[in-house]
Image (tube, grey):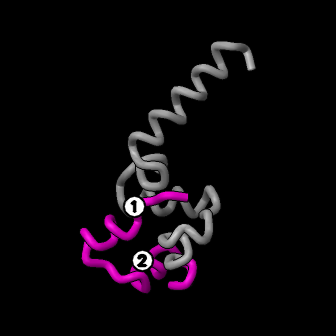
Amino acid sequence: MNNKLRVLRAERKMSQAELADLLDVSRQTVNAVEAGRHDPSLSLAFRFAVIFDQPVEEIFLGIDEARNALQLSDQTTDRGI
């Protein structure tokens, strides 16, 4: 899953270990999520969002991908699916 965690963390001059402490997970978990090797649980994704004060979809999808996902969702709803 694409995400901008590394950029957000760097902007705040925060190490993976510091972020892991705030999230109550291991540094390895933060590393795996940042690298896209592990998708976070919904609970963990929301904790990232709170820490970085950004919507989950902007952190993990990026704004363009979030818009596309919302458009697909709207199209599915419009067709009664």
User: The N terminus is located in which quarter?
Assistant: bottom right
Q: Is 52 positioned to the left or the right of 21 in the image?
A: left
Residue numbers of the magenta segment: 1-29
- Asked if the stretch drawn in magenta spans residue 45, the answer is no
Task: Look at the numbered disc 2 and give the secondary structure of its residue.
Answer: helix
The image quarter containing residue 4 is: bottom left
Residue 57 to residue 36: above or below: above
Mark 2 crowd level (few <14, some 14–19, many ≥20, 10 Å Cα): some
Q: Nearer the viewer, mark 2 or mark 1?
A: 1
Mark 2 / mark 1, whichever is N-terminal: 1
Instruction: Find the distance from the CA under tag 2 to the CA under tag 1.
Output: 14 Å
> Residue at the location (50% across, 72% down)?
35
Q: Is 76 positioned to the left or the right of 74 in the image?
A: right
Furthest residue in direction top, as rendered: 79
The image quarter containing residue 15 is: bottom left
> Residue at the location (49% across, 34% down)?
68
* Horizontal and vertical percent position of residue 76: 66, 22
Q: Which label is found at residue 58?
A: none
Closer to the camera, 51 or 40?
40
Pointer 1: what residue? 4
- Asked if the stretch drawn in magenta spans residue 11, the answer is yes
Q: What amino acid is at disc 1? A: Lys
Q: What amino acid is at disc 2? A: Leu
- Predominant secondary structure in magenta? helix
* Horizontal and vertical percent position of residue 25: 56, 79
User: The C terminus is located in which quarter?
Assistant: top right
Q: Which label is found at residue 19?
A: 2
Furthest residue in direction right, as rendered: 81
* Horizontal and vertical percent position of residue 62: 41, 48
